[in-house]
Every structure is written in C-alpha cells, then in structure tokens.
Image (tube, rainbow, N blue to C red):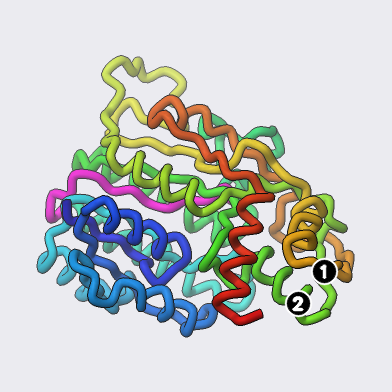
Amino acid sequence: MKILVTGTAGFIGYHVATRLLERGDEVVGLDNLSDYYDVALKKARLAHFEGQPGYTHVHADLADRGAIEAVFATHKPRRVINLAAQAGVRYAATNPHVYVSSNVTGFLHVLEGCRRHEVEHLVFASTSSVYGANTRMPFSEHQPTEHPLTLYAASKKANEQMAHSYAHLYGLPCTGLRFFTVYGPWGRPDMALFLFTRAILAGEPVRVFNHGRHKRSFTYVDDIVEGVLRTLDRIPAADANWSGDRPDPGTSGVAPYRIFNIGNEKPVELLRYIEVLEKCLGRTARLDMLPLQPGDVPDTEANVSALVQATGYAPKIDVAEGVARFVAWYREFYGA
C-alpha cells in the first residue's frame, strides 16, 4: 500500500521507511531537514533511499499548510505514520515556538489531510514524557497524563487529544504510540548513547545527571519499528460495549482510537547503561556527576501489556546487544 511517513530523515522515521520498503509497501517520505542537529547525518540517512523503487521524497515542513495539503492531494496515501516533530525536552527553553509550530500546528495539517483524503489509519508518535509528574510505576496507558513537565511533553499530549477529537468527529482511525527512550544505529546526536560514546572516545568527561540514579526503559530501534508496523496494520474501532462510565485514557468508547506504550519492560539504571557502553568501546568513562535537570523525571518504566495483547509483540532486544550494535555502526560511520 502507499504510506506517507513524515520525518524520514529522522532516526525512527528512517528505520520505519526502510522496513516498509523491505516488505513491499510504497513510501512517500517527508522531511524538512531542520538544523536541530547535524543535517549531514539526516542527508546520509536519506541517501539510502535514492534510486529505491517505491520511495518518493518530499522536502516540506509540516507547519506549511499549503505544502502538506499538496502532498495529500498529489500522493493520496492510504495510511499515514506521523513521526516528524521537534524533539528534545530541553530545546524548548530557548526555542519554545518551534514546538507549537511543528508539533501542534503541523500535526493539525496532518489530521486535516487525513480526514479530507479518507486516510484509513493514522499512526502518530507520542512519548513517555506525557506521564510527567506521575510516579506510579510501571507507566500504563490507563493512568491519567494531565501534568506534563515540559513543553515537548505538553505538545505531544495535545497531539493525543487532537487525534481523539478527529477520530470522534470524522471517524478517522488513530493510534498514538508513546515511545520510551529509543536508541540504536543512525540515532540522534542529542541523545545519551550518542553523547556518551562521543565523549568516551574523545577522552572527555561524560555528563551524568541525577548522579546516575536514572532508570530508563531503553528500547532498541528495531523493536520500536516492529511495534509501529504491527499497530499500523491493526486499525482501531470504537468500543461498542462502552457504557459511558469511567472512560479509559488508553482507549475510547466513542471513537476509533487507541494509545499504546511501546518500550522495553525491563528498565536499566543509567550507570549500568554506561558500563555496557564502556565494555563495547573497550574504554573507561570519566564521569561528571550532576544534579537532576529541570523537566527530567528520575525513572521511566513501560507497561506494554496492551501492545502485546493487541499485536502479539513486545520489545525483546536487551541493552547489551543493542548498545553493541550501535557502537559497531558508530565506529563504521564516523571511522572512530
């Protein structure tokens, strides 16, 4: 089928588009090549699609209403995977407007394109950051998420609510995926594994926030991609048995809408994560222990039982294997 994937120059978008092409789907990839991080890395990802049958690239910004309307009118995708967004929880301290422009206004343009062109399923990226001030572990889709701690998280919570309204008003099937700390080859340079690897190889200190007492549901990118494709192929429906009493935040009684956590259910301490990286690199890290950063949460832990029940799949690659794969890619790509 023809699938529009936004953010194909990005980390997860690149991997998703690659898998879709491998299984025989036609992909319309969209990206604006923002300079939030190294554009050369983004172009290197896109270079893998050059000349591939079934791939069409569109250079456009989600915030450009006319451009997005033209993409839907021209290509008429059957399904849409929206992964393009302004990422990062700290960038908003200096650039708050770009989060609303990309993540809220841009997402509205995607929703409008889907409803006007009768897209049969929209899968969109949310984040574990929406759990915010919630400290009850493991995080479950059935818990409320009304207290985000960052503008990034707030923008993603807005996406979930916007999608539900379109699912209800227009019958647009929508599935939101709350990603938990994704890592792996072709990853983002602003994320921990990339930063740690670069610092260790350069002999520079590794900045370890919260004195390393973080726990994270680190999730290898191949596991994420498998979950994305399985949810794409499962179109949600409204709950015919819903009574109107105590609505579940993870589902909907009145709309074809679902929210799923997608992450590894075995959280790993940050210091353990660094130990694994040291072993893979054959070097010892110099640790600069720092306090918790504003907006950070000490721990994340994913409950993915709903994803398992709905799709039969749960993430399974552990950090030892995943970090080793990342290091192998990093050394090859950067000649390190």
Q: Position of residue 47 (x, y in %)?
A: 35, 78
Quadrant in the rendering for residue 200 = bottom right
Mark 2 and mark 1: Cα distance apart in space: 8 Å
Q: Are marks 2 and 1 in contact (CB under 8 Å)?
A: yes
Mark 2 Cα within 10 Å, few/some/many (few <14, many 20+)?
Answer: some
> Taking 207 as reference, is 304 above or below it?
above
Left or right of residue 299, residue 259 in this image: left
- The C terminus sits in image quarter: bottom right
Q: Amino acid at mark 2?
A: Leu
Residue at coordinates 33% horizontally, 36% vertically from top-left?
Answer: 257
Q: Magenta stretch?
A: 116-129
Classify residue 150 by image quadrant. bottom right
Amino acid on which the number 1 mark rests in the picture? Arg
- Residue annotated with mark 1: 283
Residue carrying label 2: 201
Give percent across and percent down for residue 112. Answer: 22, 57
Residue 59 rendering spot, x and y as whole percentages: 28, 78
The label shown at residue 298 is none
Q: Residue at x 43, y 25 (%)?
A: 309
**Callout 2: SS:** helix
| Mark 2 or mark 1, earlier in chain | 2
Query: Quick one: 305 or 111, which is closer to the camera?
Result: 305
Q: Is residue 88 left or right of residue 24?
A: right
Taking the magenta stretch, the answer to whether it contains residue 143 is no
Residue 121 forms part of the magenta stretch: yes
For this view, does 302 lie left or right of residue 224? Answer: right
Residue 302 drawn at (x, y percent)? 60, 38
Secondary structure of the residue carrying numbered label 1: loop
